[in-house]
Each structure stands twice: as C-alpha cells, then as structure tokens.
Amino acid sequence: MNKYTAEVLQFLKNKYPWEKEFIQSVTEVFESISYIMEFNPIYQNHRILERIVEPDRTISFKVPWKDDQGKIHVNSGYRVEFCNVLGPYKGGLRFHASVNQSSLKFLGFEQIFKNALTGLLLGGGKGGSDFNPRGKTDGEIQNFCQSFMMEMSRHLGPRTDVPAGDIGVGAREIGYLFGTYRRLRNSFDGVLTGKGLGWGGSHLRPEATGYGVVYFTEEMLKQVNENLDGKTVAVSGFGNVSWGVVKKVNDLGGKVVTLSGPDGYIYDPEGITGEKVDYMLKMRLSGRDIVADYSTEFKVDFKREKRPWEIPCDIAIPCAIQNEMNESDVKTLLANGTKCIVEGANLPLTLEAMKLVQESDAMYAPGKASNAGGVACSGLEMSQNALFLKWSRDEVDKRLHEIMRNIHTQCHEAALEFNMPGNYALGANVAGFRRVANAMIDQGIN
Ligand code: GLU
C-alpha cells in the first residue's frame, strides 16, 4: 500500500479501534485507491483521505416508543451524514439488532462511492436503529416509526438529506415515516424514497436493487460471451434485494435454487418461480424473519443454521447482510465450479473471502457497483418528485438499465487503466473515489 494511504489507515485504526466494520470497508477501498495516490500527489496535497474518512456529522438520538401492552421501550437512532459534495446525503435506514455507529459508518462510507458511480447528484449517508422489527405488530412498527421521525425530521430536506429503506425498512415503514414528516413539517416533500406509487413513489423502486444486480451480472457475463440463460443461481436472504434478483433471473432464463434467513436456507432444485416468488413477499410481511416457512409451504429441503453456499451453482449472489460469506464458503463455491460471485448486499464477503475470489478465475462484482440500482432508482424518484411527474415503468427501467451498464463500463475501464482487466473491485473504488475526490478539490477545503 502507498505510504500516504497506509498512514491514514493506521491513524484511523488507532483512533477508532472498536469500529471493526468501518475499518474493514476503508481498508477495502484504500487497497484499491492506493494505486492512484502514488501517481496523483494532488490528492495527498489536498489531504483528501483524511477528509473523506470522517463523516460531515453523525446524529445520534433516543427513540422511545410504546408496545401494544403499554410497556415503554427505548432504542437508539442514528443518521450518519457522510459526504454531500455530489448531492444531498442519500442512503437507506436500517432497522436491525446489529445497527450501531460502526456499522452505519461503514455503510455510509460505501454509499458515498456507490452513489458516485450512478453518475447522479447523490451524496452519501446511512441511518437506522437497533430496533428489531421481528415479531412486532403493525401498531408497534407505526409507533416506532413516528417516534424515530420526531427527531429525524429536523435533519431532512429534499436538498439536504433523503433517506430510503434498507434491511427492516420497506414500503410500509417509509409510509409511516413520510406521514409523520409531512405532518410535523406541514410540507409534502420528496424527502424519502421508496414511497408508495400513489403518493410520489417511482415505478420499479421495490425491484430496482435486485434488477440492477442482475443487469450488472449480465454485463459481466457478456465479457466472456456468456449469459444467464440456463444458469443455476444460489441466492441468500429473502428480502427486497433477493426478490428482485429472483424475478429478473427468471426473466432472463436462469434458475434460482436457494434462499436463506437467520434460521438457515432452503434448497428448491425446481427453481423459485410463479407463486413461490409472491410467497417471498408474504414471508417478509409476516415479520417472522424465518425462511423455514418456505420449506413447509412448498415441501423442499431446509438446512437449519447452514448457508446456501454449499449448493453447486454457476452464480452466487449474496443478498442478506455484511460478512455473510467467508473464505471457506468461497472455497466450497469455487470447488463446486461457481464462475461468478456478485454482491447483492453491502459488503457480504469478508476481506479474506474477497481476496480469495479475486485470486481465482471466477468473476467478482463488489456491492458498491452491482447493488447500486436501488439508490439509482431512488435518484430517479427524486428527479420525478422535483418535476412533479411520474415516468412510466418502461421509462424507469430503461434509465435503470442504462445506469447499470454505465457503472459496468466505468469499473471495466478503470480496471483496464491499471492493467488489471476484470478487477471490478479496483475499478469501482477508483472510479467512485475519483469523482468524489475531484469534486472535493473543486469545492475547496470544507
Ligand atoms: N439501502 C439501499 C442501498 O444500500 C438504497 C439506498 C437509497 O435508495 O437511498 O443502497
């Protein structure tokens, strides 16, 4: 690693030794951009790395709420407003027991470069709460969202900060959050994305992350004269991203054979098609957060507490959560002949797993490139809101497809520039970083 890059990384490790996931994501980005630091002293002169690793601000607040029995609970809420040199802070809200400042800093940091790759005017941020939606009633979810927005509302604005969904936050939660914002501020603003279609949402937003992942996969496969037709695909998770992936893989002639939850995974060798795809939505809405229900409903195998990566597949798409695929999972996949690993989630591969797949012949797509379709469609939703217009489904799909192709081209070309053809991780980090860093230089020290 180049000297300046290594020094900033060491400084960060000393300053925030407990922020393991954040350090992991910075290490991953720094290893790639180390190459450009060497030949572009301007970034060091402007102290871009020190400036980029510190969020503009982190808002931390309490979220008190009442359950159906009248008992009062208190959760922690956060918004990490990381960087707005390219546009309003943009990134999802995650409601999950694992949420803390370190995990949100890592997600916010990733989001800066992901959003830059979309080519739209989007800054980077992330927020959420350690509130666990599992087993909560609709009324409890509403109470929680209203309390969360009581504080969050004062930090948002269509040109300031525009959150969206992420794990544990879907259309229903966005509805409750938006309603509270609208009432508190007496203003109908495009201040959240992923809104309902009838009140400012965009066509395709629910599917966009998953569709984008598959569009990116298609582009990668084209490089080796391949396509998705007839391919077996292993997917993890059963939420929003997995659902979109399953739908688009089916459209393009592939077959998804696994889904997973915190309880284990299901193996459906016939493929997840038709009513089974709709059943994914029911599982999500049930709030039970277990995938075993699928095996009961459709009489397929369920492997308790196992991950789907032991099933032979051509393509593996981890769509659940960070660090869900380790070195030994990658070894198993490669031994079984997997040719392509595409990240649907944010940083689902550990650093070691990522290195291993990069050293192999298999192709690898980093989440900040391959899962950017969700936030890209959010950007399209913001554009539509600003125009007070709604584009057709085809129009949005065309734009989304174009953005994903363009992200692929940027990654591909940046990798070629450094003589590392096919290294999408390097390409994504370099292309994303350059856009942000150059804007920072243009805009002066602030
Ligand atoms: N949570 C999604 C992501 O990780 C979407 C963010 C957004 O639409 O703002 O990119």
Image: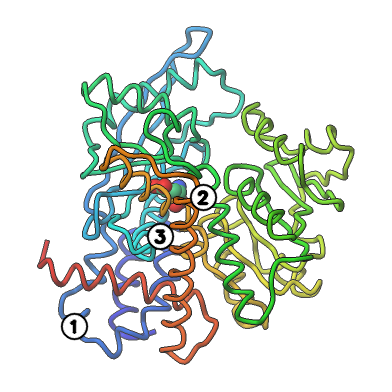
Q: Secondary structure at mark 3?
A: helix
User: Is 172 or 401 nearer to us in this picture?
Assistant: 401
Taking the spot 46% from the left edge, 78% from the top edge, the residue there is 426
Above or below, 296 relative to 344:
above
**Percent of width and height locating residue 34:** 36, 82
Q: What is the CA distance from the residue labelled 3 to the residue labelled 1?
A: 23 Å
Q: Is mark 3 within 8 Å of ligand 1?
A: yes
Q: Secondary structure at mark 1?
A: helix
Give amino acid for label 1. Answer: Ile
Taking the spot 41% from the left edge, 54% from the top edge, the residue there is 376
Q: Quadrant of the C terminus?
A: bottom left
203 vs 136, left or right, is left
Determine whether the residue tagged by mark 2 lies in a helix, strand or loop.
Answer: helix
In terms of sequence position, does the residue under pointer 1 or pointer 2 come before the other? 1
Determine which quarter of the picture holds residue 124.
bottom left
Q: Amino acid under label 2? A: Ala
Residue appearing at x 26%, y 65% in the figure: 52
Front residue (pair 75, 279): 279
Q: Is residue 263 left or right of residue 296?
A: left
From the top left corner, tell me how far across and down residue 266 is, in percent. Answer: 80, 46
Residue carrying label 3 = 110
Quadrant in the rendering for residue 434: bottom left
Give the residue at mark 2.
208
| Structural distance between the alpha carbons of marks 1 and 2 | 37 Å
Q: Give the distance between the C-alpha atoms of the residues marked 2 and 3, in whole angstroms.
A: 18 Å
Would residue 103 be seen by someone viewing this image from the given angle? no
Residue density around tag 1, few if under 14, some if 14–19, many if 20 or more, within 10 Å = some
Q: Which residue is mark 1?
A: 42
Crowding at mark 3 (Cα within 10 Å: few <14, some 14-19, many 20+): many
154 left or right, relative to 426:
left
